[in-house]
Amino acid sequence: MQSGTKVSLFLSPQLPLKLFSLYFCEEGQLLLIKPLIIMKKYPLPYYAVIFTSIRTEGDNGYADVSRQMMDLARQQEGFLGVESARQELGITVSYWASLEAIEAWKNNNMHQIARQKGREIWYRSFRVRIAKVEREYGFREDLL
Amino acid sequence: MQSGTKVSLFLSPQLPLKLFSLYFCEEGQLLLIKPLIIMKKYPLPYYAVIFTSIRTEGDNGYADVSRQMMDLARQQEGFLGVESARQELGITVSYWASLEAIEAWKNNNMHQIARQKGREIWYRSFRVRIAKVEREYGFREDLL
């Protein structure tokens, strides 16, 4: 497997995250599992946390902690899934079953440490919006 | 000004879109104004349309129509702003004053034609979520 190779992995329908990009380092070891999209429908209403950010220059340990936080978020009760993209602007939308689940994740000790580093080091600016998803529809989701 | 040069433009605080990327073609003419982020706070609650998509291969006229739709959206009553990023996955979040404003934009004739082409040509898959923004907070927005 070449460095930077991307493959799609289809997981159990019980898992909220269905489509991933896998990145392998030169020795063929798995380097990063990056969630692409959540395709599962959740019962309405549920909640979206829209996190919009502009990064500072350089990685400064961001990629490692970001992956750790993604792994940790998946273990939280009420976590449904996450979608993320970055160009100049980064947008990460995470989905949760309830406001209580969002609050518990916000107060998670490891997450609080990461959030503090975000303000000190990684982000030039960000905004967080908490929104109740009331309607949704899709197109050709079965093809993914 | 070189082709592909990006500069930041600070506009009047009355405008909902504050930070842009400007793209110039070789003759120095403005090619594209791409909104980076909306930094203005709107009275709560307002609405977010979270559009998550995976594109088909090739441009096929997408960039032109996408720009036209962005310009047209800005003219709609109740349009507040838009944020967008794409890697493998594209996320565009547009913000609206009311559900009625979202519905009117969905039914706009030009937008309906573009949406049809989206299903036929540009998107392999997408999902649209309509969510009521109930809470928000930010960090260092004054620096942008």
Image (tube, coloured by chain):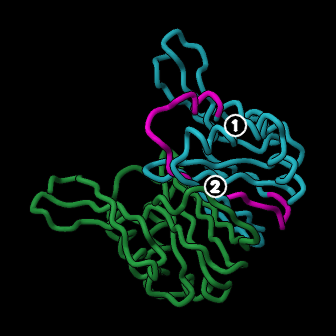
Chain colours: A cyan, B green
- Point out the stretch of residues depicted in magenta: A42-65
| Residue furthest left in the image | B27
Q: Is residue B5 magenta?
A: no
Image position of B40 (left or right of A47): left
Residue A28, quarter of the rendered image: top right
Q: Of the residues shown, which amino acid type is indicated by label 2?
A: Phe
Q: Residue at x 63, y 30 (%)?
A: A33
The answer for which chain carries disc 2 is A
Instruction: Looking at the picture, tell me which residue is in the foreground, B53 or B43.
Output: B43
- Against B10, is B71 above or below? below
| Residue furthest top in the image | A27
For label 1, the SS is: helix
Q: Position of residue B130 (x, y in %)?
A: 69, 71
- Against B23, is A58 above or below? above
- Against B29, is A77 above or below? above
The residue singled out by tag 2 in the image is A51
Q: Residue at x 28, y 55 (%)?
A: B6
First-in-chain label (2 vs 1): 2
Q: Which mark is residue A114?
A: 1
Nearer the viewer's eye, disc 2 or disc 1?
Answer: 1
Question: How many residues crowd mark 1 within 10 Å: few (<14), some (14–19), many (20+)?
Answer: some
Residue B62 appears in the rendering: no
Q: Position of residue A103 (x, y in %)?
A: 85, 53
Q: Position of residue B32 (x, y in %)?
A: 29, 66
The answer for which chain carries disc 1 is A
Q: Of the residues shown, which amino acid type is indicated by label 1?
A: Ala
Q: Residue at x 51, y 49 (%)?
A: A124
For label 2, the SS is: strand
